[in-house]
Amino acid sequence: PQADMAELLGSDFDYETAYTQGTDLTGVLGVKKYEKYVALNANGDARGSFPSYVIRTDQNRCQNLKGVIWQAYNDNKQFQVSVKADGSSCTIWRVGDEYGVGSRNLSLKLDSASNFTHVANKIHDSLKDVVYGDYCIQGELLAPNIQGNFEGVTKPEFYAFAMQNIAEQEHENPLHVYEFCDRYGINHVPVLHHSVTLRELYPNASDANELIDLIVASADGDSGFNGKFREGLVFKGTTTDLTFKAIGERYLMKKKD
């Protein structure tokens, strides 16, 4: 409207003669393009069973591994400590000429309009000319229509937390996973410590029970994304095969509400 234009440009600005019809005024007026988020299918279209040659992404809670965690504490084993994201498990792989994407339990179609295929196709496209051979990347899929958007994202986003050597049926070292993601521009879940011992993190633990209590207490904290707080922490051994998760008490209370 004319009144609005005069307010923006000044009351003495002759807006009728200053610009000809069709002139782009976005820069002059500070206008930014708004692109409305178009929700994709949250779960994707099932293609079949989850592939047998891919290890699933489940992590044990620290409370279930007291003995082995206490042993790792005393043996000074080192761990990568990362933020646990609240989204949906997503696995992206290439084996030979086959490209795939899967949820926690299913293989999904790559030609459907879903959050899974959106992020998987982007990663496959970015890696097709630079990575030769098989790969399997696992991570957390965040989107406005997943888990009530606990992490506060505005579009589907994939954050890697693991890779697998399919031929050997084993996980890659977390340090290698982070390096791979950094090299090829793939989001990685936020890392708080790249390689640290449990004794360095919790120096005053006197026994296994106290150590677990300290780990669980540290699981609460700031979100690694845009959420109000984090779900918890994930510990992945860099000098051991031991991995486990700790869920924050604040998050557990939220789930009970």
Image (spheres, rainbow, N blue to C red):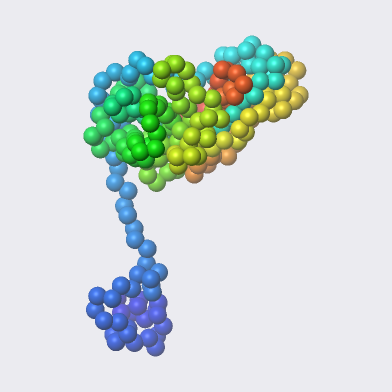
**Residue 211 falls in image quadrant:** top right
| 126 displayed left or right of 242 | left
Residue 157 appears in the figure: yes
The residue at the point 37 percent across, 26 percent down is 134
User: Which residue occupies the extreme top position in the image?
Assistant: 67
Give the image quarter of residue 145. Answer: top left
Q: Which one is nearer the viewer's eye here, 102 or 88?
A: 102
Place of residue 230 in the rendered image (x, y in percent of width and height, measured from the top left)? 54, 35
Name which residue lies at 37% across and 23% down. Answer: 104
Looking at the figure, which quarter contains the N terminus? bottom left
Nearer the observer, 176 or 209: 176
Q: Is residue 184 above or below residue 210?
A: below
Q: Is residue 241 left or right of residue 124?
A: right
Spot occupied by residue 30 in the image (x, y as percentages of width and height): 40, 69
Residue, x 24% and y 24% (percent of image)?
47
Q: Is residue 257 left or right of residue 18?
A: right
Rendering coords of residue 159 (x, y %): 45, 36
In the image, 85 versus 254, the foreground residue is 85
Q: Is residue 217 shown to the viewer in this render?
A: no
Q: Where does the image place residue 161, in percent across and percent down from the top left?
A: 48, 30
